[in-house]
Image: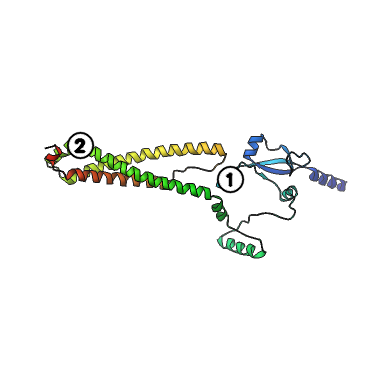
């Protein structure tokens, strides 16, 4: 009686479908849910493959190397994959988790010395190699940023010169009332610094809104949790400091140029 029960239990376990996990893009496009039965085969359109049951839906990772790919991912047991691919006891690549950097160095040395043809790399090195396109885009953005900063600095200086020139009579009246050049320069610089702070705050707000829109659009387009645009505290600090430096510098140059002119000459006399 007990032997028959054990045999029946083994038969049920052997005939029950194996489990696989699929990525969320495949689940959404094919309308697959957990518990659905699928036929997995190494040939497209084949119906004589292995019947499997979907046990999990895996969320896609934020990997830049997968952005341009429209591939679907399926996670299965190793023996299932070997039988499906027909590789037998061979693999193209495998990942090894280590505890610390010393263990990583030792694993790299042991794997590379095991036999000819084995080549081990750190995961971060592979990520760098597969993300070269994003590095080129990042350098391109930095070049655009430098050009924009230089052009905006020249434009800001011109605007400050024009604004200060419009106040020639006001500055002349202050000078004739006994206000010193230093006080006039301090007033213009303080006004320029205030305008720079207000402008940087508005710029950070516009940048944050633009970043949110870019992430919303491209995350939906590529269906990935990867962030395409980020506003970090370091970027905000750089923007504010740069805005203050450029604003104060432009105000200082414009005010010094104006206070060096005699008051009566400012009145046109």
Q: Tell me how far mark 2 sits from mark 1, CA to CA.
A: 58 Å
> Residue drawn at (55%, 55%), measured in percent from left and top?
125
10 and 81: which one is in front? 81
Task: Farthest residue to the top: give it.
Answer: 31
Q: Is residue 183 visible?
A: yes
- Residue beneath label 2, please? 167
Residue 139 vs 166, above or below: the answer is below
Residue count near mark 2 (Cα–Cα under 10 Å), binned few <14, some 14–19, many ≥20 = few
Q: Is residue 60 left or right of residue 51?
A: left
Q: Is residue 88 left or right of residue 6?
A: left
173 and 147: which one is in front? 147
Residue 262, quarter of the rendered image: top left
Query: Which element carries disc 2, helix, strand or loop?
Result: loop
> Residue drawn at (48%, 36%), measured in percent from left and top?
213
56 and 171: which one is in front? 171
Q: Is residue 155 left or right of residue 120?
A: left
> Residue drawn at (56%, 39%), measured in percent from left and top?
222
Q: Position of residue 132 (x, y in %)?
A: 53, 50
Q: Is residue 238 left or right of residue 194?
A: right
> Residue drawn at (55%, 46%), measured in percent from left and top?
64
Q: Position of residue 77 (x, y in %)?
A: 71, 48
As drawn, the label of residue 66 is 1
Residue 185, quarter of the rendered image: top left
Q: Position of residue 171 (x, y in %)?
A: 17, 39
Dots 2 and 1: beta carbons under 8 Å? no
């Amino acid at each position: 009686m007990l032997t028959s029960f054990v045999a029946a239990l083994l038969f049920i376990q052997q005939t029950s479908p194996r489990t696989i996990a699929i990525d969320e893009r495949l689940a959404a496009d094919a309308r697959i849910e957990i518990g659905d039965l699928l036929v997995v085969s190494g040939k497209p359109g084949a119906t004589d493959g292995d019947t499997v049951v979907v046990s999990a839906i895996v969320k896609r990772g934020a990997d830049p190397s997968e952005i341009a790919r429209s591939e679907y991912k399926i996670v299965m047991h190793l023996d299932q994959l070997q039988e499906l691919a027909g590789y037998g006891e061979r693999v193209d690549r495998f990942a090894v988790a280590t505890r610390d950097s010393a263990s990583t160095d030792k694993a790299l040395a042991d794997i590379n010395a095991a036999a000819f043809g084995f080549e081990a790399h750190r995961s971060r090195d592979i990520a760098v190699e597969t993300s070269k396109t994003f590095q080129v885009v990042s350098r391109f953005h930095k070049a655009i940023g430098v050009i924009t900063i230089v052009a905006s600095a020249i434009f800001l200086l011109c605007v400050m010169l024009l604004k200060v020139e419009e106040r020639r009579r006001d500055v002349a009246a202050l000078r004739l009332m006994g206000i010193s050049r230093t006080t006039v320069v301090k007033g213009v610089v303080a006004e320029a610094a205030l305008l720079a702070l207000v402008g940087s705050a508005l710029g950070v707000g516009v940048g944050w809104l633009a970043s949110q829109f870019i992430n919303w659009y491209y995350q939906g387009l590529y269906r990935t949790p990867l962030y395409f645009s980020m506003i970090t505290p370091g970027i905000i600090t750089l923007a504010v400091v740069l805005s203050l430096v450029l604003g104060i510098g432009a105000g200082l140059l414009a005010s010094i140029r104006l206070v060096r002119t005699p008051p009566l000459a400012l009145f046109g006399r």
